[in-house]
Image (cartoon, rainbow, N blue to C red):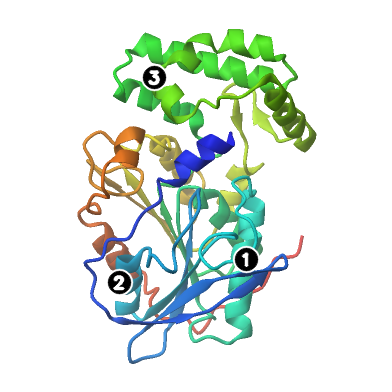
């Protein structure tokens, strides 16, 4: 995925809705990861110790979570149920040290989450023996990796989660249709993207790439949001870097495989999972993800998987008209889907997840 594409996707984060009440007390809490100090904020329920802590895991893109009070309504809702929540800014964002890296791997992001949990436990923060995860979009790869390493995670709330492959093929076709291309045009342009990507990955020349993507690069939607005004020198440099990194790709779809054996990773999850999807999501193929979740976690004993879809809502679980990439980027933030927060609250209460289970084993990393 190109840097420009990641930057564009980074604007599609679930932004805060500020109607929630002030039922929380907040404090600055930083932690170290790979030699850098990452700046975070811990919210506690007002007037009582927290029974657990929910870690909020970001999607793609730069963050301003601490100063911008991101997810404030969600954090307040957790506090009302007696749960603390913890969120931080990525490296190079907010007051976090280091340089922001669009290309940070999901494996590295999972280690970052584990470092944050480790700091909460080291400080013996109230609720740190009962950790749950909430994550959006890209966090659909990160959270399962965290659970694999720390199998006593209490629960996972997946918002607009991912299937086993990178989602740009779906994003491109879905949005070309929203932008007015007919079925044949959308498929033809997507086929050009796949041919160009295969050439890029396998050492094709700059001239071959230009010929393979001639119509795609002229398409107004693609050109406006994703086309990089590159040079042959830049193409070759990026090509050498990608080939040296040797990322796995699915040849049929041309999509990167972010987590090898992802299906097996999901199948091993034994904590309760709430999966939430907007039915107008044009960023992630929510139907494929839903099917994957049902085929893996949905087959676990004890009905651990709960799924809720929201008509008329986009990737960010916000109300929308089209759910398209352009609308999500250019419109002011829309209200959250009706029932989104209530669904989370009802599920947590029904599963008894707001009370730390005394019988749970202490958190630990699984040996490999």
Q: Is residue 23 left or right of residue 294?
A: left
Instruction: From the image, tell me which residue sits under label 2.
Output: 77
Q: Secondary structure at mark 3?
A: helix
> Which residue extends farthest right?
244
Q: Nearer the viewer, mark 3 or mark 2?
A: 3
- Disc 1 or 3, which lies upstream in sequence? 1
Q: Is residue 71 left or right of residue 117?
A: left
Instruction: From the image, tell me which residue sits under label 3.
Output: 220
Category of crowding for the residue at label 1, using alpha-carbon neighbours closer than 10 angstroms: few (below 14), some (14–19), many (at least 20): some
Mark 3–mark 2 Cα distance, whole angstroms, equals 42 Å
Q: Residue 91 in the image: x percent, y percent?
A: 60, 60
Category of crowding for the residue at label 2, using alpha-carbon neighbours closer than 10 angstroms: few (below 14), some (14–19), many (at least 20): many
Mark 2–mark 1 Cα distance, whole angstroms, equals 30 Å
Q: Residue 260 in the image: x percent, y percent?
A: 66, 41
Q: Secondary structure at mark 2?
A: helix
Instruction: From the image, tell me which residue sits under label 1.
Output: 97
Is residue 39 shown to the viewer in this render? yes
Residue in view at x 65 percent, y 22 percent = 231
Give the label on residue 22, or none: none
Residue 22, compared with residue 225, is above or below; it is below
Is residue 166 shown to the viewer in this render? no
Q: Residue 365 in the image: x percent, y percent?
A: 69, 68
Mark 1–mark 3 Cα distance, whole angstroms, equals 38 Å
Residue in view at x 39 percent, y 10 percent = 185
């Amino acid at each position: 995925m190109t840097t420009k594409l990641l930057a564009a996707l980074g604007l599609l984060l679930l932004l805060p809705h500020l109607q929630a009440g002030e039922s929380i007390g907040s404090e600055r809490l930083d932690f170290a990861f790979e030699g850098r100090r990452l700046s975070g904020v811990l919210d506690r329920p007002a007037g009582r110790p927290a029974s657990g802590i929910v870690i909020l895991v970001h999607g793609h893109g730069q963050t301003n979570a601490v100063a911008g009070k991101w997810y404030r309504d969600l954090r307040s809702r957790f506090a009302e149920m007696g749960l603390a929540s913890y969120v931080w800014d990525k490296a190079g964002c907010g007051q976090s040290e280091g340089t922001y890296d669009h290309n940070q791997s999901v494996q590295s992001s999972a280690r970052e989450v584990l470092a944050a949990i480790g700091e909460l436990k080291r400080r013996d923060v109230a609720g740190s023996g009962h950790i749950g995860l909430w994550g959006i979009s890209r966090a659909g790869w990160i959270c399962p990796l965290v659970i694999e390493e720390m199998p006593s995670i209490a629960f996972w709330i997946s918002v607009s989660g991912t299937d086993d492959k990178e989602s740009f093929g779906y994003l491109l076709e879905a949005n070309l249709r929203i932008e007015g291309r007919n079925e044949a045009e959308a498929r033809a342009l997507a086929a050009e993207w796949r041919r160009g990507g295969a050439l890029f990955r396998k050492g094709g020349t700059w001239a071959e790439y230009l010929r393979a993507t001639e119509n795609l690069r002229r398409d107004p939607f693609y050109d406006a949001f994703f086309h990089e005004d590159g040079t042959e020198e830049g193409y070759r440099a990026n090509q050498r870097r990608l080939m040296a990194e040797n990322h796995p790709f699915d040849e049929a779809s041309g999509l990167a495989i972010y987590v090898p054996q992802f299906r097996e990773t999901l199948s091993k999850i034994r904590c309760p999972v709430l999966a939430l999807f907007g039915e107008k999501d044009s960023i992630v193929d929510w139907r494929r993800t839903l099917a994957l979740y049902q085929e893996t976690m949905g087959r676990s004993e004890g009905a651990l998987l709960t799924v809720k879809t929201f008509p008329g809502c986009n990737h960010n679980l916000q109300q929308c008209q089209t759910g398209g990439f352009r609308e999500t980027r250019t419109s002011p933030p829309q209200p959250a889907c009706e029932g989104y927060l209530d669904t989370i609250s009802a599920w947590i209460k029904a599963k008894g997840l707001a009370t730390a289970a005394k019988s749970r084993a202490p958190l630990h990393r699984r040996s490999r």
